[in-house]
Image (cartoon, rainbow, N blue to C red):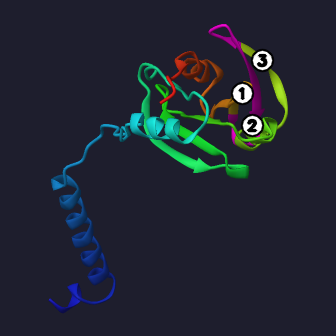
Amino acid sequence: MRRFTEGFYGYAVALLVCLVGAGVFLLVTPQSRDEHIPRVEYSITVANFGHEVPYRVWAPRNDPAGWVPNSNRIAAGNAGAKVLFLGYATAEREHAMFAQSDEKPAAGFASRMANSDKAVGTQQIGGATWERRFREDKNQRTLVRMLPDVTLLITGTADWPELAQLASVLQQRPQG
């Protein structure tokens, strides 16, 4: 019996016992193969943002099909401006984020959020012109719309058609 507790055979037996134990553990442990992205409700954050800013807030009237809202927050921008962020997992499971602020200068806010100050074209979405920006090293696409009182951005790793889906469901909310 001593030869199974010493030397190479002892090592092999101990290794085999460990592997069998790990295999049994993996077999009896429940495992889910279903993807789970937590859904985070943003309506209260949007309403609170509307109470904090002096302009009518933009927000999705509904979420694009298959998209999951998974984050939202209000943050401080430059010079006392507030910034609303709504994050999504898209139908293709890429990341997209909607941001808006009245931060001045608007071009500086847009460049900071897009990680780029270079336009690569424009895109018509719902009758409105959006500027496209692209940062290749981060695989980040951004749609920018600068209005007189607010700057709107949609940015992320999602492709242009997916970002346009989010832009197409944006609407101004009543001031409240």
24 relative to 122, above or below: below
Q: Is residue 84 left or right of residue 18?
A: right
Q: Which quadrant would the N terminus be assigned to in this image?
A: bottom left
Q: Quadrant of residue 37?
A: top left
Q: Earlier in the sequence, mark 1 or mark 2?
A: 2
Q: Which residues are magenta?
A: 124-140
Mark 1 vs 3: CB contact within 8 A: no
Q: Could you tell me which residue is drawn at 47 percent across and 30 percent down?
A: 176
**Marker disc for residue 110:** 2
In the image: residue 124, left or right of residue 22: right
- Asked whether 137 falls inside the magenta stretch, the response is yes
Query: What residue does disc 3 label?
Result: 122
Q: Quadrant of residue 25?
A: bottom left
- Disc 3 marks a residue whose amino acid type is Thr
Residue 64 in the image: state x and y as whole percent: 46, 20
Q: Which mark is residue 38?
A: none
Tag 3–tag 2 contact (CB < 8 Å): no
Residue marked by disc 1: 144
In terms of depth relative to the viewer, which is nearer, 68 or 78?
78
Query: Which residue lies most toward the right here?
Result: 118
What is the C-alpha distance between the residues marked 3 and 2?
Answer: 15 Å
Badge 3 element: strand
Give the quarter of the image for residue 166.
Answer: top right
Q: Nearer the viewer, mark 1 or mark 3?
A: 1
Q: Position of residue 38 (x, y in %)?
A: 36, 41
x then y, percent, for residue 68: 41, 32
Q: Residue at x 62, y 25 (%)?
A: 159
* Amino acid type at mark 2: Ala
SS at mark 2 in the image: helix
